[in-house]
Amino acid sequence: MPQTPARPNASASVHGVALKAFSEARSLLDAFMSEPANLQRVDRVGELLAQRLAAGNKILICGNGGSVCDAMHFAEELTGRFRKDRRPLPAIACADPGHITCVANDFGFEDIFARWVEALGQPGDVLIALSTSGDSRNVLCAVAEAKVKQMTTIGLLGKYGGMLKSQCDHEWIVCPPDGMDAVFSDRIQEVHKVILHTLIEVIERVLFPENY
């Protein structure tokens, strides 16, 4: 008769994982907050986004993998709601599988975001580019196209910025803090999400102060 596989000793294998994970997340956020320029840039960029939206411009946002999920989350909280009801704001994440697979098949994966920016971007619009490595070539191409379209570019990057470092008008680089040898994409994305949520709050505080 087949033997029932032994059950793993879960308590032994995962002991301390939660403490380590939360401690890493806190260390990375503390390191980000220890640089006053990072926080000042959130306020300044949030005000810029509010001004562009008030002028009738829109926000485009792109990224790969978990970053495209963050892009969609950011966009839906502008077109839908964040904390309280208010009018919808124009934001679009590049997450249409028809567009992505068409362009990847016909032109190449590097062009999926650039052609989308070329199609939808207008002078005065804003592109938010997400890349935890800073080396996503399709995001780099999108930033280059946004410059051609006379758009403002904002980069949320990780590690040491990669090829995208200094390519955007405004950027944050989520770096490993002292004492941490490396930082993985999941930790970087957690800080990116805090930045994105705070940008939305700044936008709302400027455009809908009655909600606060």
Image (cartoon, rainbow, N blue to C red):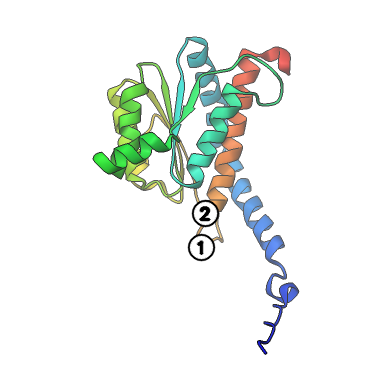
Q: Is residue 178 above or below residue 53?
A: below
Say what secondary structure mark 1 lies in: loop
Give the residue pinned by disc 1. Answer: 181
Pick the quarter of the image with the N terminus.
Answer: bottom right
Give the residue pinned by disc 2. Answer: 176
Local crowd size for mark 2, using a 10 Å CA cut-off: few (<14), some (14–19), many (≥20): many
Indicate which disc, 1 or 2, sits on the residue closer to the N terminus. Answer: 2
Mark 2: amino acid: Pro
Q: Is residue 194 above or below residue 208?
A: below
Q: Quadrant of residue 33?
A: top right
Q: Residue 75 location, x and y as percent?
A: 54, 28
Say what secondary structure mark 2 lies in: loop
Q: Residue 133 location, x and y as percent?
A: 42, 50
Q: Is residue 55 above or below residue 173?
A: above
Q: Residue 207 location, x and y as percent?
A: 61, 13
Q: Along the horizontal axis of the image, is 144 left or right of 124?
A: left
Q: In front here: 76 or 130?
A: 76
Asked whether residue 140 is in view, the answer is no
Q: Residue at x 72, y 17 (%)?
A: 211
Q: Is residue 133 above or below residue 143?
A: below
Q: Residue at x 43, y 33 (%)?
A: 94
Q: Along the horizontal axis of the image, is 212 left or right of 196?
A: right
